[in-house]
Image (cartoon, grey):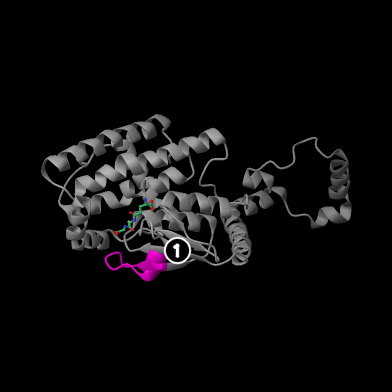
Amino acid sequence: MEEATGVRLVADGEYPALRRWANEYVSDQAVKRCLPDREKLVAFYAANKEKFRAEIKAILQRDQQAKMAQHPAVKLMSAFGSPFAHRVEVALALKGVPYELVLEDLANKSEMLLKHNPIYKSVPVLLHGDRPAICESLTVVEYVEDAFGGDESAPRLLPADPYERATARFWAHFIDTKILGPLWMSLWTDGEVHERFSKETKENLAILDAQLDESNKRFFGGDALGIVDVAGCTLAHWLDPMQEAAGVRVVADGEFPALRRWAKEYTSHEVVKRSLPDREKLVAFFAANKQRFTSMVKA
Ligand SMILES: N[C@@H](CCC(=O)N[C@@H](CS)C(=O)NCC(=O)O)C(=O)O
């Protein structure tokens, strides 16, 4: 089994009494006649490796879901096409947290949204049990990590190491303030204002691109998806449809190659894929709301 899986659980020389007994056992005449051939066993386990892995994964997921079912109910207030709400959807899905999705119409905000997020009046908003709402996507992602992160088998969204954790928070905040803010302004403005915000967006995209390029990793934090990746989701999936709907080109094809490579990884991640809105529907949504967004940025 160890040979087929490539996992070394027991090293040679460990547990000498058990080894001695194993030798006795397998050399017993009656036992010997009933033992399957070693090489056939290796071939059998090697051939069924993926099947066994999938079975174990399903068992672990079921355990996780059973544990989650004991938690108070989780509700996520979202809106179609919101990359900020997508961050939270991915975090909840990664942790295997079942939740109810409540979709808002942001052009006509519900009493429920205004009650739970009276300060920003935006989505996402997370409700967990009877406690007051948690607002602001990155704060919510961190809450999901803390509240549902107890199980070691659940993937981490933030690194365990305090330095790495602080660094991840820095880059997530950088994306929000230095890229997404100016990008949004550049999409819905024109003339000199548009030029100024485009320039600022691109300068900061270049910094992020260099950051990814230097590390040469699949995701911002390494091989696994983390908070910086979900923070950057707009750049991976929303940017092109937003530009198409706005009729502006802030980022040209071929620019920022490390970010393009990362975007492909991000959008093809199994968990992420399930919560990405359809590209054409996004174009239609942003085109239909162009007037609203243009007035919002002028206000
Ligand atoms: N900083 C906020 C931004 C959230 C945000 O802007 N959400 C948008 C939807 S994508 C929203 O609800 N906007 C309110 C509106 O359109 O009036 C966060 O990270 O949660």
What x and y, as percent, mark residue 35?
Answer: 78, 54
Determine the residue positioned at 31% across, 46% down: 235
Range of the magenta residues?
A: 102-116
* Residue lying furthest top: 214
Determine the residue positioned at 80% across, 35% down: 13
Determine the residue positioned at 72% across, 51% down: 37
73 or 55: nearer the viewer: 73
What x and y, as percent, mark residue 42?
Answer: 66, 49
What x and y, as percent, mark residue 269?
Answer: 42, 51
Label 1, ligand 1: CB separation under 8 Å: no
Q: Does the magenta stretch include residue 142?
A: no
Q: Quick check: 128 above or below 188? A: below
- Which residue position is annotated with label 1? 76
Q: Which amino acid does label 1 sit on?
A: Leu
Q: Does the magenta stretch include residue 103?
A: yes
Secondary structure beneath dot 1 equals strand
Q: Can you tell me which quadrant of the image ligand 1 is in?
A: bottom left
Few, some or many residues within 10 Å of mark 1 (<14, 14–19, 20+): many
131 or 259: nearer the viewer: 131
